[in-house]
Image (spheres, helix red, strand yellow):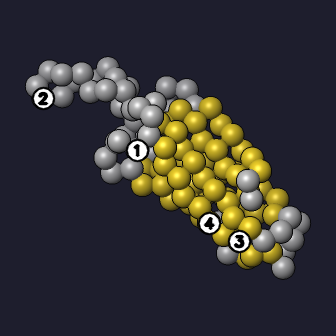
Amino acid sequence: MASGVKPRVKVPKKASAGDTITIKTLISHKMESGQRKDKSGNVIPRSIINRFVCEFNGETVIDVTLDPAISTNPFFEFEAKVPESGEFTFTWYDDDGDVYTTSKKIEAS
């Protein structure tokens, strides 16, 4: 598991049913390419976020496949329609097999 990985998301706590909201996500991740070496001359293993998925109440909102050229600490901003109260689940997948997940609830009136 990559050290210091911290997913952060910003989702409004409330919205009217049917509203479109803006969601912002950021994950602190070093994104090692697998081409650098440590002080001892050993290759640092590749560790890159290769996929990001956001779901609302189990239904996919966005599913992004990332290429190796993605920057350190990838940031996503996107819009989602909120049909009802529920929970957004955010998942980042790492090349090394690690999966990072966080979720946020939203109340629709």
Which residue, given by chain and number where applicable, does mark 1 sit on?
29
Helix, strand or loop under label 4: strand
Q: Nearer the viewer, mark 2 or mark 4?
A: 4
Q: Quadrant of the N terminus?
A: top left
Q: CA distance from mark 3 to mark 2?
A: 46 Å
Q: Position of residue 56 (x, y in %)?
A: 73, 57
Residue 79 in view, yes or no: no
Q: Is residue 1 above or below residue 70?
A: below
Number of the label disc, if any, that sits on residue 104: 4
Which residue, given by chain and number where applicable, does mark 2 sit on?
39
Horizontal side of 47 relative to 9 (left or right) equals left
Q: Amino acid at mark 1?
A: His
Q: Amino acid at mark 2?
A: Lys
Q: CA distance from mark 2 to mark 1?
A: 20 Å
Q: Are marks 1 and 3 in contact (CB under 8 Å)?
A: no
Q: Is residue 30 above or below residue 32?
A: below
Horizontal side of 77 relative to 61 (left or right) equals left
- Mark sitting earlier along the chain (2/4): 2
Q: Is residue 90 above or below residue 95?
A: below
